[in-house]
């Protein structure tokens, strides 16, 4: 009986002492030599990637540099540092146009090529006509309307005519000169850099005949006139950025007189303002 009591007491003491011993060991700090070993022990090395034998280890490449995009909107520079698209919100101003004001065109010939009219033209004429009219020189001036490009103007031409030399004794030389003042109406067509104008003219054919003095006879001169019509056409080429044009003119003189019809060919160059 007494032996059983001792064994039971020993078991109780053992059960109580074991946890206390474990707690004491846990709470007790490590000795200095063990702490020094723990401080000197390196961290475990990082795992290196495994490559097949014979191939060197390649460092991973750095990411590409970040690209930026800049743009200027309304005088302000916008920088886009990411990969998406930036949307800029601006302000627009809308103004109404004045219908009564015409745009200023750098090249006035460009305006004339569109046959907008409302302009004055002036040009000399130089050429030749058949049926003894011969060389001719003169000028033309006119005006083209704005809405409908009708042309109205006038021309004045002087033709040298012919001279009949005296072939028999007692005869004198005879000189004929022609002057043609006329009015013209036509219509302008713009064809690229060209302007074509069919027209019709009407006026007077003034013929001046002069006879030289011979055998003590005085010289004489006489002027007669006849009504004249002539259909014709002119083509003008406008030189860019200048009011200058060059061109040609053709006409058929139809006089109401004993003189027959004559064909005239003229060169022209002038100004369109």
Image (spheres, rainbow, N blue to C red):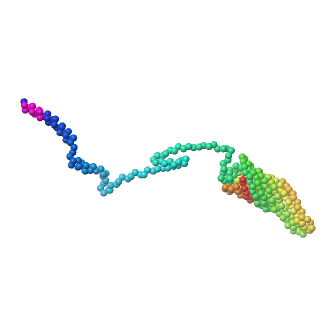
Magenta segment main secondary structure: helix
For residue 263, what is the image quadrant? bottom right
Q: Residue sitting at 48 percent across and 48 percent down? A: 79
Q: Residue furthest top?
A: 1
Percent position of residue 136, x then y: 79, 60
- Residue 201 in view here: no
Q: Residue at x 30, y 54 (%)?
A: 52
Q: Is residue 58 left or right of residue 21?
A: right
Instruction: Answer whether residue 233 is magenta in the image.
Output: no
x and y percentages locating residue 31 in the rendered image: 20, 46
Decide which of 103, 70 is in the foreground and name it.
70
Give the mark count: 0
Q: Residue at x 72, y 54 (%)?
A: 272
Magenta part of the chain: 2-10
Location of the N terminus by quadrant is top left
19 displayed left or right of 248? left
Magenta run includes residue 5 = yes
Q: Nearer the viewer, residue 148 or 101?
A: 101
Residue 99 in which image quadrant: top right
């Amino acid at each position: 009986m007494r032996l059983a009591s001792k064994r039971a007491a020993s078991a109780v003491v053992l059960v109580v002492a074991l946890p206390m011993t474990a707690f004491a060991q846990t709470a007790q700090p490590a000795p200095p030599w063990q702490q020094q070993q723990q401080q000197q022990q390196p961290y475990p090395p990082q795992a290196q990637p495994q490559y097949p034998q014979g191939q060197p280890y390649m460092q991973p490449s750095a990411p590409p540099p970040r690209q930026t995009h800049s743009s200027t909107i309304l005088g302000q520079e916008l920088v886009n540092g990411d990969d998406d698209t930036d949307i800029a919100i601006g302000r627009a101003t809308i103004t109404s146009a004045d219908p009564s004001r015409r745009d200023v065109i750098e090249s006035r010939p460009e305006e004339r090529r569109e046959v907008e009219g409302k302009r004055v033209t002036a040009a000399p004429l130089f050429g030749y006509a058949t049926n003894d009219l011969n060389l001719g020189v003169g000028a033309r001036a006119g005006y083209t309307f704005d809405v409908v490009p009708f042309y109205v103007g006038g021309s004045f031409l002087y033709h040298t005519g012919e001279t009949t030399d005296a072939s028999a004794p007692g005869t004198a030389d005879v000189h004929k000169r022609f002057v043609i003042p006329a009015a013209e109406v036509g219509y302008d067509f713009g064809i690229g850099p060209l302007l074509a104008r069919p027209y019709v003219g009407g006026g007077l054919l003034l013929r001046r005949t002069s006879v030289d003095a011979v055998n003590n006879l005085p010289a004489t001169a006489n002027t007669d006139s006849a009504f004249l019509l002539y259909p014709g056409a002119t083509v003008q080429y406008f030189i860019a950025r200048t009011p200058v044009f060059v061109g040609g003119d053709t006409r058929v003189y139809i006089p109401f007189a004993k003189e027959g019809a004559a064909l005239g060919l003229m060169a022209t160059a002038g100004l369109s303002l």
